[in-house]
Amino acid sequence: MRYEIGQVNRLGNRSSNQDRFLAVETDEGVLLALGDGMGGQAQGEVAAEILVEVARRCYLETQRPIPEVGSFLREVMLQAHQAINAFGRRQQPPTTPGTTGVLCLIQQDQAVWAHVGDSRLYLYQQGLPIYRTTDHSYVEQLFQKGEISRWEQDLHPRRNQITQCLGARHDKPEVSISKPVSLKPEDIILICSDGLWGPLDDAVMGRMLLADNALEDSLDKMAESAEHNSYPHSDNISAMALRFIASGTALLPGQSKQQARTVAAGGDQLESAIAQIEQVLKEYEKEFKS
């Protein structure tokens, strides 16, 4: 499979960055993951970090290609939820960190995605948003019931209230899973936090994705526009996009591809938290695999 990946992250008008995202690239496919730590909860950045780390580990430790992608993505989300809660219980005093999340696995020229909360995935074809995840949020529920319009969603005082998350509560989250979607050349998959999609129209983002030859240049301009539109209340802005180019392999004979592009952005001092994450994951490793 031939593809291009771009990524962008901005702090916005915030004192810390609670977004984390990652791409794990193997011979068999690419896993994209993004978490947006909940600002109203302590250690939201750690919750987002746990999500991307659990996703990375699960993908690399699973036989690939993965036959039941939807089930795999749901299990990753639930394992992350469990690990986040376990991390919170270990703190003194205990905390309840939480994060939204979106995952997408691209393999065999197909994409399947999963999400919890209001971090989004878009699939653009020729700049048009063919698919978009449906937010787990209070205002989205009102819209689905026909009680408010799309325009009213943007102005609603509870527009930032999510109804599902990873961590922060004992109950298992509702994980929304897509059906497999076959990709066409030049299709673009975009995963992003609400700091990007909130200030920008879906169609505008599609046009901006086509504006430059390099995907990363387009993302950088999108993030700059989102930050400008929401100033002085800009949230953390994070996005990763994959442009599907063609089937087959871009590798030369004898080469192998297995790497992870990870962003733990904003300069947060997470060394101690990461060590605790490692300990939590080791302690629950057998339970995760059962």
Image (tube, helix red, strand yellow):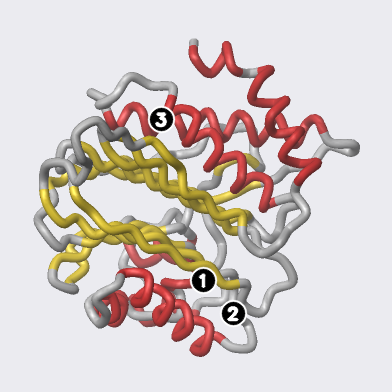
Report which residue position mark 3 lands on.
59
Residue assigned mark 1: 195
Residue 133 drawn above or below residue 288: below
Q: Earlier in the sequence, mark 3 or mark 1?
A: 3
Is 211 on the left-hand or right-hand side of 99? Answer: left
**Could you say whether the residue bearing mark 2 is in a helix, strand or loop?**
loop
User: Disc 3 on helix, strand or loop?
Assistant: helix
The residue that label 2 is drawn on is: 234
**Which is nearer the eye, 281 or 290?**
281
Q: Quadrant of the N terminus?
A: top left
Find numbered disc 1 in the image and state the secondary structure of the residue it sits on. helix
Which quadrant of the view contains residue 273? top right
> Residue 84: x percent and y percent?
65, 36
Is 191 in front, or is 92? 191
Residue type at tag 2: Ser
Q: Residues within 10 Å of mark 2 (few under 14, many from 20)?
A: many
Q: CA distance from mark 3 to mark 1?
A: 27 Å
Can residue 163 be seen here? no
> In this rendering, is residue 215 above or below 54?
below
Image coords of residue 257 (percent x, y): 33, 37
* Earlier-in-chain disc, 3 versus 2: 3
Instruction: Tell me the number on the disc at residue 138.
Output: none
On the question of residue 12 being in view, the answer is yes
Q: Residue at x 17, y 63 (%)?
A: 130
The reply to whether dot 2 and dot 1 touch (C-beta < 8 Å) is yes
